[in-house]
Image (spheres, rainbow, N blue to C red):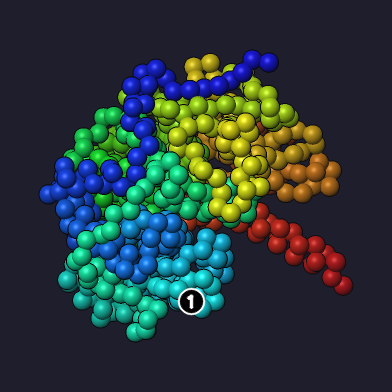
Amino acid sequence: MSTSILSSSSSEADGRDLLQPIPLLDALTETVVRFGDRPATDFFGKRLSYAELGRLIERAARGFQLLGVKRGTRVGLCLPNTPYSIICYFAILKAGGIVVNFNPLYVEREIAHQIEDSGTTIMVTADVEKIYPKVAATLGKTCLERLIVCPMLSLFPMMKSIFLRLFKSAQFSQIPNDLRHVSFARLISDHGAVEPVPIDPRIDLAVLQYTGGTTGVPKGAMLTHANLAANVAQIRVHMHDVTPGRERALLLLPLFHVFAMTAGMNYCIAIGAEIVLLPRFDAREVLQFITKKRPTLFPGVPTLYAALNAKVASGRYDLSSIRYCFSGGAPLPLEVRQRFEQLSGCKLVEGYGLTEASPVVSGNAIDAEPRDNSVGRPFVGTMIEIHSLENLKLLMPAGEKGEVCVRGPQVMAGYWNHPEETAASFIDGALRTGDVGYVDADGFLFLVDRLKDIILSGGYNIYPRVIEEALYQNPTVAEAAVIGVPDAYRGQVPIAFVTLRPGCEITSAELIHFLKDYVSRTEMPKTITIRGSLPKTAIGKIDRKQLIEEERQRREAAAASRGAP
């Protein structure tokens, strides 16, 4: 059988020299030197220059070393999007430590599990009532020994800080004055020099990024300095039309997520962009920020752009400053991309990646028309292989579906303390993504679905994404999600959930009738439920797992009701 091995195009090959393994910190050091007087961060109007950011990172790194952080020490970050996130991230690396990103929305049990699994001994968090108590509760119950607590109020301009102290004080926690707690002010209080830590970028880990991977069991993807630095370099080659030192990025994707960490924070710092930080997503607030702050770059996820499409139609907002948006994290519906580009005038570029690849693997070109419904061509230095679903050793020809596998300098070193999971995630040295896709004759990658999301119905493979794309063709549909549920006759059948655009009305029966021209009888959803909202993950993806769990509980309750006397 002919093989399908897709590598970088020859036009991108000139960027290969940028992929030499280097410490991730090198890009920050260069930017501080080149653009020291340029703004680095903007948090609700309070700004830091790159020179100021560099000094704070230096002092925080000194503080971490005085707390015992050395080469290989795991230090957790459990923070909303704030300058603290950036300062402490790079300070940990400079001190020789390994960053462990924690989702602040996790419950105490999930935080405790990740602390124990990673061996995190120091955690940086915020004095926010929704975060701090959960983290503090793990002290003494896990291997966590010390908390560094960052005061949120000090980040805001004076008048806003006064307002928050007066009227929002219940949102902030009282922090004990004991040896287990260290204030951020104390962390940066020593002005001594940082002890240099030799870094081997190929071997030394920069980040433990937790993910469910292809098995669903949370585990830490080991991302080396070389992995992350290479992915930043690959994005720079791809986004060749930006101007270093002159761009401004709006970053509201959570920095604990790998996409925001690399394509947002690390990339923007490498090009000396100003990072406008937002700690939460509110469509109206985001549109106001875009109108006021005038960002030129705006990375996001499809649900974010879909939500803005619904709000911006009023015409009260000016999105004309945006030049490029880079979408990742989930498939970008064609209608969502076209609508956002029409409303903003910017280029919305879809890319593809996964945590285990630092994360970006491919993307559509910024200077050419995208291939509709494609996630583009692989980044420089990256190879994509399509392996047979029946026999992983076989490679599929162009146009044939199979499991997408990846090789490249951005591919992880493996899973932390999970050698069996690591072995199962590679085939002949190529990373198994768990995604089903194909490559067309021109080298564009198309994703069909996740292996674990495929619905097996009466002997047929049904791909939820095909049905979702069909639903998006209806002008009333804002969001769509399809899952498989048990069926006594066919094994599984698809069911769909949708939300509607503001002011639109349609019935489930009308949507079923609409789909007849777009999907086969086998693919037709058994039911379509119209909801006010769909559950989302922390980064804004539609949460299929929660939909599956909700449907399971509904079916169990219905069965119990039928069995009741």
User: Above or below — where is 350 with respect to 103?
Assistant: above
Identity of the residue furthest to the left in this view:
37
Q: Residue at x 44, y 60 (%)?
A: 74
The crowd level at tag 1 (other Cα within 10 Å; few <14, some 14-19, many 20+) is some
- Which quarter of the image is occupied by the C terminus? bottom right
Q: Residue at x 80, y 36 (%)?
A: 458
Which residue is more in the foreground, 396 or 43?
Answer: 396
Q: Where residue 48 sits: x, y (%)?
A: 18, 57
- Which quarter of the image is occupied by the N terminus? top right
Circle count: 1
Q: Amino acid at mark 1?
A: Leu
Q: Where residue 128 sits: x, y (%)?
A: 37, 73
Identity of the residue furthest to the bottom in this view:
177
State the image quarter where residue 83 is shown: bottom left
Q: Where residue 151 sits: x, y (%)?
A: 29, 72
Q: Left or right: 402 with respect to 536?
A: right
SS for callout 1 = loop
Which residue is more in the foreground, 481 or 296?
Answer: 296
User: Above or below — where is 306 with respect to 384?
Assistant: below
Q: Residue at x 61, y 37 (%)?
A: 426
Residue 125 seen in render: yes
State the image quarter where residue 305 is shown: top left
Q: Residue at x 68, y 30 (%)?
A: 392
Residue at mark 1: 139
Q: Where residue 38 sits: x, y (%)?
A: 15, 48
Which residue is more in the foreground, 406 or 363?
Answer: 406
